[in-house]
Amino acid sequence: MRGFYILALLIIASNALAATVNGNLVIGNKGTASFNSQGSFDINVAKGDAVRISNLNSIVISNPGSSGDRTASDNVCYYATTAQYTIDMDSQSSPTGNFKLVNTTNSNKTVPYELTWDDGKNGTADATFLRNSDTAQTINSNNRASASCQATGGTNATITVTVRNASYNSMSTGLYTDTVHITVKAK
């Protein structure tokens, strides 16, 4: 039995020696591997247009004693690297139909409102939204590529909410609320 082990070791050793030919390691009949190997690969990078909105805050209409339409605004930071973008605003409490603020103690009590977007390039509203069914609106952005407001926490655009005077005067006493989702896309 001892002779069998010695013979097996000699066969293994001779195969290992036969596997090295001219400094290359031969691995059975599956080809050769080298101590040097070369290849190539491609590197690709693509940069698309980008938009960003940040510094969004809650908007509170806090002028109940005033007359006329009730408005309040939030100044936000808007950034674009494209000549055009689309913007869309959707109300959580009105999946269909007009935007509405809902009374926190009685969901049957609502008040309609509208939203406007001004990206600050000309001082007037660029888009008005009254309902979720409004389609995203296309805005010429003039390549607002300065991201300085993001770095400093500054602002360069405004979202305004308006409750019309007649709607406000017909409201029952209470707190009314809604959540709005805003989507800005490069075009």
Image: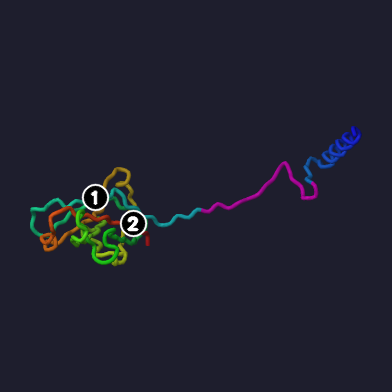
The amino acid on which the numbered mark 1 sits, given as a three-letter code, is Ser
Number of disc labels: 2
Q: Is residue 163 above or below residue 20?
A: below
The amino acid on which the numbered mark 2 sits, given as a three-letter code, is Asn
Q: Is residue 41 left or right of residue 77?
A: right
x and y, in percent, of residue 119 in the image: 26, 56
At label 1, counting other C-alpha atoms closer than 10 Å, the crowd grade (few under 14, some 14-19, many 20 or more) is few
The residue positioned farthest toward the top in the image shown: 2
Query: Per the image, is 125 magenta?
Result: no
| Secondary element at image label 2 | loop
Q: Quadrant of the image for the N terminus? A: top right
The residue positioned farthest toward the right in the image shown: 3
**At x 90% / y 32%, what residue is drawn?**
2
The reply to whether callout 1 and callout 2 are in contact (CB within 8 Å) is no
Q: Is residue 153 above or below residue 104?
A: above
x and y, in percent, of residue 72 in the image: 18, 54
Q: Is residue 162 above or below residue 149?
A: below
Tell me the distance, in whole angstroms, between the alpha carbons under discs 1 and 2.
27 Å
- Quadrant of the rendered structure where residue 116 is? bottom left
Main SS of the magenta part reads: loop
Magenta residues (range): 28-44
**At x 13% / y 59%, what residue is drawn?**
171
- Front of the two marks 1 and 2: 1
Q: Is residue 11 left or right of residue 165?
A: right
Q: Which residue is mark 1?
A: 58
Q: Is residue 105 left or right of residue 25?
A: left
Q: Earlier in the sequence, mark 1 or mark 2?
A: 1
- Residue 43's mark? none
x and y, in percent, of residue 153 in the image: 28, 44
Q: Which residue is mark 2?
A: 143
x and y, in percent, of residue 44 in the image: 53, 54
Q: Quadrant of the image for the C terminus? A: bottom left
